[in-house]
């Protein structure tokens, strides 16, 4: 993926907006990319999170229960996978499917904690907000 596209995606995400250019560069260099076609399953509820969370660079995803109830549609600039990543069980809490071609940037939470503890705290806060939203 083009470095400029990565930088634009990072700057467009509220989680990363307070980071300086050097921190954004480190995130871009450390990111892995993943691409999914329409109808591809990103992950299933109960899958091992393996410490990974992602930023949606382009496309759309549907978060749903195993019964097929759609909880939320997620798009460009949104973080995914943070709940399973920070949970004690380390498991995915929803099914996530691409509803159009989608590109993600992915990181391991251990790498983030090593390079930016404040970002790790923001990621945890986001996860707790999502858990609260789904339980209301």
Image (cartoon, rainbow, N blue to C red):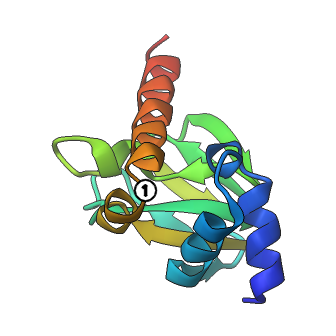
* Image position, residue 2 (x, y; %): 78, 89
- Furthest toward the bottom, the residue is 2
Q: Is residue 62 left or right of residue 31?
A: right
The answer to which image quadrant residue 40 occupies is bottom right
Residue at 39%, 58% (x, y): give it: 44
* Image position, residue 117 (x, y; %): 37, 49
Q: Is residue 62 left or right of residue 65?
A: right
- Furthest toward the top, the residue is 136
Residue at 59%, 65% (x, y): give it: 23
Q: Nearer the viewer, residue 17 or 45?
A: 17
The answer to which image quadrant residue 114 occupies is bottom left
* Image position, residue 11 (x, y; %): 77, 58
* Image position, residue 41 (x, y; %): 53, 67
* Rendered position, 38 above or below 112: below
* Rendered position, 69 above or below 48: above
Is there any visible trace of residue 130 in the rendered image? yes
Is there any visible trace of residue 93 in the rendered image? no
Number of marks = 1
Image quadrant containing the N terminus: bottom right
The answer to which image quadrant residue 116 occupies is bottom left
Residue at 39%, 37% (x, y): give it: 124
Q: Nearer the viewer, residue 84 or 16?
A: 16
Q: Nearer the viewer, residue 54 or 15?
A: 15
* Rendered position, 54 above or below 40: above
Residue at 82%, 67% (x, y): give it: 8
At label 1, counting other C-alpha atoms closer than 10 Å, the crowd grade (few under 14, some 14-19, many 20 or more) is some
Query: In this figure, which residue is indicated by the disc labeled 1?
Result: 116
* Rendered position, 110 above or below 66: below
Q: Nearer the viewer, residue 19 or 76?
A: 19
User: Which element is circle 1 on?
Assistant: loop
């Amino acid at each position: 993926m083009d470095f400029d596209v990565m930088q634009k995606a990072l700057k467009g995400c509220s989680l990363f907006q307070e980071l300086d250019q050097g921190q954004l560069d480190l995130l871009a260099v450390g990111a892995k990319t993943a691409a999914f076609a329409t109808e591809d399953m990103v992950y299933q509820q109960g899958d091992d999170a393996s410490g990974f969370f992602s930023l949606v660079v382009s496309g759309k995803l549907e978060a749903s229960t195993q019964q097929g109830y759609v909880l939320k549609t997620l798009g460009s600039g949104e973080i995914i996978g943070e709940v399973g990543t920070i949970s004690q069980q380390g498991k995915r809490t929803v099914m996530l499917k691409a509803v159009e071609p989608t590109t993600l940037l992915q990181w391991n939470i251990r790498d983030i904690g090593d390079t930016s503890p404040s970002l790790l705290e923001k990621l945890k806060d986001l996860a707790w907000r999502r858990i609260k939203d789904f339980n209301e």
